[in-house]
């Protein structure tokens, strides 16, 4: 039997389809696993007033599960939150949630931005067709930006990464959502 953390990782690796899904693997994010273990929702329990009780579960994107299980996972997650006296806010959710919730009472939607999605198998064609993307890559290259893969044993709690994160968060007015 796997631990909850191992199950979350397995679900993300099997069903994670966008960048938000992989945020569930970050430390500090809470996880709700469906009773059958077939779906997971990462979320941040939030208080509406400083020092008050938790009244909102802010979900990090849609449930991570097989596409056929999205609606059941949404229903179960919302029921679990309501059983704890909490409302749910689906943050960073996209098409999969929209399909199962559009037209239902009690839901509203606000677009805050968009994330580009590219098929890596078509990378050369994508670069050829996107001047702005080429410009961004050239700008990074000209500034000497390089990418090096670090194993999690090195990256986890690395002082330089923690300092960078701390500096970035210090300039933000909202509480950390961990995703």
Image (cartoon, grey):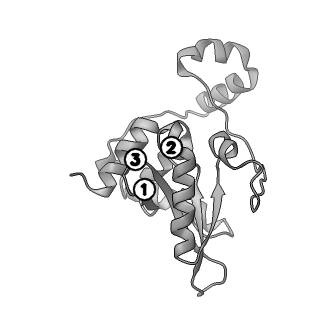
Q: Badge 2 is on which residue?
A: 69
Based on the displayed image, in which of its 4 quarters is residue 49 positioned?
bottom right
Disc 3 marks which residue?
Answer: 38
Residue located at (39% from left, 59% from top):
159
Determine the image quadrant of residue 171: bottom right
Q: Are marks 3 and 1 in contact (CB under 8 Å)?
A: yes
Q: Badge 3 local density, few (<14 within 10 Å), some, or many (20+)?
A: some
Q: Is residue 59 left or right of residue 27?
A: right
Q: Which mark is residue 175?
A: none
Mark 1 Cα within 10 Å, few/some/many (few <14, many 20+)? some
In the rendered view, would you say 88 is above or below 74?
A: below
Compared to residue 18, the image places residue 125 above or below, namely above
Chain-order first, disc 1 or disc 2: 1
- Residue 54, position in %: x, y? 56, 79
Quick check: 96 left or right of 155? right
**Of pointers 2 and 3, the one earlier in the residue sequence:** 3
Q: What is the spatial separation of the Cα atoms under label 1 and label 2, in whole angstroms?
A: 10 Å
Circle on res. 34: 1
Q: Nearer the viewer, residue 107 or 147?
A: 107
Q: Secondary structure at mark 3?
A: loop
> x%, y% of residue 134?
68, 22
Secondary element under disc 2, as helix, strand or loop, is: helix
- The answer to whether residue 43 is above or below residue 137 is below
Viewer-proximal residue among 31 and 84: 84
Query: In whole angstroms, how far apart are the C-alphas of marks 3 and 1?
Result: 6 Å
């Amino acid at each position: 039997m796997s631990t909850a953390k191992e199950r979350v990782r397995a679900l993300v690796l099997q069903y994670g389809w966008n960048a938000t899904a992989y945020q569930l693997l970050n430390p500090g994010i809470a996880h709700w696993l469906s009773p059958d273990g077939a779906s997971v929702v990462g979320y941040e329990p939030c208080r509406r007033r400083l020092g008050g009780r938790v009244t909102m579960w802010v979900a990090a994107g849609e449930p991570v599960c097989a596409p056929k299980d999205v609606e059941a996972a949404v229903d179960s997650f919302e029921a679990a939150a309501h059983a704890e006296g909490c409302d749910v806010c689906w943050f960073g959710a996209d098409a999969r949630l929209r399909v199962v919730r559009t037209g239902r009472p009690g839901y509203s939607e606000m677009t805050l931005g968009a994330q580009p999605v590219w098929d890596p198998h078509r990378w050369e064609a994508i670069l050829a067709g996107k001047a702005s993307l080429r410009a961004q890559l050239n700008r990074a290259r000209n500034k000497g930006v390089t990418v090096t893969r670090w194993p999690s044993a090195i990256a986890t709690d690395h002082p330089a990464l923690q300092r960078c994160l701390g500096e970035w968060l210090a300039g933000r007015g909202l509480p950390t959502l961990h995703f």
